[in-house]
């Protein structure tokens, strides 16, 4: 596999004051981040210092490491940069990334690295927050700030706390979007508070949060109460986690929470509440299409109701609006103006899949690779959910950063699975692997081993930067293995972090269809991959989707709800999911795919 050094800027011919090479900055940044994460993990201080010193050395170098490497010139001897670190420099220059950094990022709970970027706190304090208060994300830090727990920590004085609160607020730039659980962490306590207010009959959330978009820009909350009563909004605005009120009148307010989230709040009378809910749930495009339909029927639709000749036909209940327009109620997840109104009109709305339709999970890890619970604990938790099956899919050897399994360790696990299966009552453990798809499309495990498994989940964990044709070909080749079952997180995107790698996803879906294999909807909130749109394409091609938790601990099975959200947005019905099948049906499908 040829490697692709990053494109270099043309050499500068004229004599200028030596500018710092941009690639060096990237290298230094990787080293800094490694040092930070090592420190978070409580690693050996000498090792941490080595990376910090190396970062400084690299940053201060005027020669460009990338240019040197591209032209095959050996790197000069630099103080503090020994063999190991020079190899890392080489790796960063050639791949744009660093396996050690990737490993550390995976090991450290997701939101902690985000906390590192807050002013005033470094790894030591983040570690303290995590260990003493369980803070592991901006949202949980926000909570701990609001309820005063941070104040009790040693070393967190009033000035630091103020700085933190300020920084959290500043993060609420208009472009900032939140993952669904991040949004939930801010929305749910607020809803609880609002619902508890004396004058408020109910509080509901509309907008993209209700439509379950994979990311949420702001929260749109409706209060059913008397719009004439100014005490309603006044009491709502006493919510303790409000950082700033940008605008406020008796029936609407716009504010920002300490967690950074912006909130649009509206007080709506009961007679209009359904219409307001319909309007503010959106999407905008769906609303426009619905209003067009209303006009065509001689009506007028707005956030107060559906009117004909000034008389309100509907407004109290959301479903009444749809009904008055000759439509069944349309689930919020479908309201994107992508054919749902026509489908509703013709009685062709899908019967969207629900969490309870799942009969098992086909992607999870135990302590044997990078999970946190034992095989038995994972099995018991799955059984307790009433599932029929759970596939154990550890990483393969190549992903040594995640303690991937070699043949011996895999075989030992298979024996353990046999023993547990004898013991388990209603659950069957399936034997699987999350095997690395290598750069050339071969799988990181010999066929003799793969043949002993029920499920082979293939995943790309490296070489994200291949040209689109090559990446597509690589994955198609992997799918050609007779043992290949499911393509894990097919596009490799990480929300708020990176786009998916360039990939001809249509070709992959088609190939899956031809090969009789399956695509995953990875339910990790940062992945949600396949996304809603591609789920719909898979369905159109008759490719079944495995809605998978990729659980690394028993509680991660709860993440499946986020997968179901996106599956619903992708119009999937129970029958479109691989893991809604009974064990017998699943086994037959697995058999056929070989
Ligand atoms: P977000 O917040 O960016 O994740 O997405 P949404 O869908 O929550 O959008 P947002 O918060 O701007 O507005 C909430 C809903 O209000 C939106 O889905 C539809 C409705 N809405 C807002 N602005 C307009 C508009 O200009 N025209 C129409 N028809 N509806 C609007
Ligand atoms: Ca919104
Ligand atoms: Ca809004």
Image (cartoon, rainbow, N blue to C red):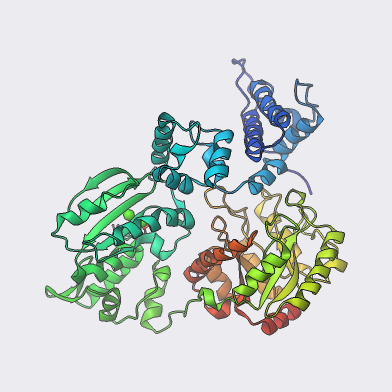
Residue ID at (49%, 67%): 565
Assign the C terminus to one quadrant of the image: bottom right
The answer to whether residue 325 is left or right of residue 29 is left
State whether residue 587 is above or below residue 433: below
The one nearer the camera, 147 or 480, is 147
Q: How many marks?
A: 0
Task: Name the image quarter holding residue 342.
Answer: bottom left
- Say above or below: 256 vs 10: below
**Front residue (pair 594, 229):** 229
Residue 172 x/y as whole percent:
39, 43
Q: Position of residue 452 (x, y in %)?
A: 83, 72
Query: Image quadrant of ligand 2?
Result: bottom left
Would residue 560 be seen by someone viewing this image from the given angle? yes
Work out whether residue 18 or residue 411 is closer to the camera in this orientation and state it: 411
Asked whether 197 or 342 is in front, the reply is: 197
Name the side, left or right, on which 196 lies relative to 557: left
Q: Residue 64 in the image: state x and y as whole percent.
A: 68, 26
User: Can residue 543 be seen in the rendering of this structure?
Assistant: no
Q: Eyeballing the image, is 5 above or below 525?
A: above
Q: Is residue 527 left or right of residue 167?
A: right
- Tell me residue 534's x, y (percent): 55, 66
Q: Can you tell which quarter of the image residue 408 is in?
A: bottom right
């Amino acid at each position: 596999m040829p490697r692709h050094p990053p494109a270099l800027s043309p050499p500068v011919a004229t004599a200028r004051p030596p500018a710092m090479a941009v690639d060096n900055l990237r290298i230094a940044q990787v080293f800094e981040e490694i040092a930070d994460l090592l420190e978070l993990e409580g690693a050996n201080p000498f090792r941490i210092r080595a990376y910090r010193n190396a970062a400084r050395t690299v940053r201060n170098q005027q020669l460009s490491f990338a240019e040197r490497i591209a032209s095959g010139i050996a790197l000069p001897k630099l103080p503090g940069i020994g063999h190991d670190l020079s190899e890392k420099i080489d790796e960063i220059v050639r791949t744009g990334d660093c396996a050690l950094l990737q490993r550390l990022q995976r090991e450290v709970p997701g939101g902690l690295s985000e906390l590192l970027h807050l002013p005033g706190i470094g790894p030591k304090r983040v570690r303290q927050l995590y260990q003493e208060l369980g803070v592991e994300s901006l949202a949980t830090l926000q909570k701990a700030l609001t309820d005063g727990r941070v104040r009790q920590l040693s070393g967190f004085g009033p000035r630091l706390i103020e700085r933190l609160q300020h920084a959290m607020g500043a993060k609420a730039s208009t472009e900032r979007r939140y993952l669904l659980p991040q949004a939930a962490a801010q929305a749910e306590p607020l809803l609880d508070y609002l619902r508890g207010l004396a004058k408020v009959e109910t509080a509901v959330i509309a907008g993209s949060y209700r439509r379950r978009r994979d990311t949420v820009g702001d929260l749109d909350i409706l209060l059913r109460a008397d719009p004439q009563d100014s005490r309603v909004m006044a009491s709502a605005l006493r919510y303790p986690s409000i950082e700033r009120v940008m605008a406020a009148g008796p029936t609407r307010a716009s504010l920002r929470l300490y967690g950074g989230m912006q909130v649009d709040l509206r007080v709506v009378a009961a007679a209009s509440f359904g219409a307001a809910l319909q309007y503010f749930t959106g999407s905008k495009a769906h609303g426009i299409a619905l209003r067009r339909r209303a006009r065509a029927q001689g009506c007028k639709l707005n956030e107060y109701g559906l009117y004909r000749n000034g008389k309100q036909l509907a407004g109290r209940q959301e479903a009444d609006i749809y009904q008055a327009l000759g439509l069944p109620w349309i689930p919020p997840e479908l309201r994107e103006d992508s054919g749902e109104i026509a489908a509703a009109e013709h009685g062709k709305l899908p019967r969207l899949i629900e969490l309870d339709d799942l009969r098992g999970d086909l992607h999870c890890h135990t302590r044997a690779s990078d999970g946190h619970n034992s095989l038995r604990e994972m099995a018991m938790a799955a059984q307790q959910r009433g599932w029929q099956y759970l596939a154990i899919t550890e990483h393969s050897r190549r992903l040594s950063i995640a303690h991937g399994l070699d043949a011996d360790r895999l075989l030992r696990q298979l024996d353990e699975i046999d023993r547990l299966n004898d013991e388990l009552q209603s659950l069957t453990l399936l034997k699987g692997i999350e095997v690395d798809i290598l750069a050339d499309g071969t799988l990181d495990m010999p066929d003799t081993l793969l043949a002993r498994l029920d499920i082979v989940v293939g995943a790309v964990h490296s070489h994200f930067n291949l040209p689109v044709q090559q990446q597509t070909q690589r994955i198609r080749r992997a799918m050609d293995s007779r043992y290949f079952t499911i393509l894990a997180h097919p596009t490799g995107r990480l929300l708020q972090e990176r786009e998916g790698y360039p990939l001809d996803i249509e070709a992959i879906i088609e190939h899956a269809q031809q090969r009789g294999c399956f695509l995953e909807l990875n339910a990790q909130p940062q992945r949600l991959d396949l996304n809603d749109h591609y789920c719909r394409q898979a369905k159109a091609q008759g490719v079944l989707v495995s809605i998978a938790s990729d659980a690394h601990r028993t509680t991660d099975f709860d993440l499946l709800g986020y997968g179901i959200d996106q599956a619903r947005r992708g119009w999937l019905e129970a029958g479109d999911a691989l893991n809604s099948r009974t064990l017998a049906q699943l086994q037959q499908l697995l058999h056929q795919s070989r």
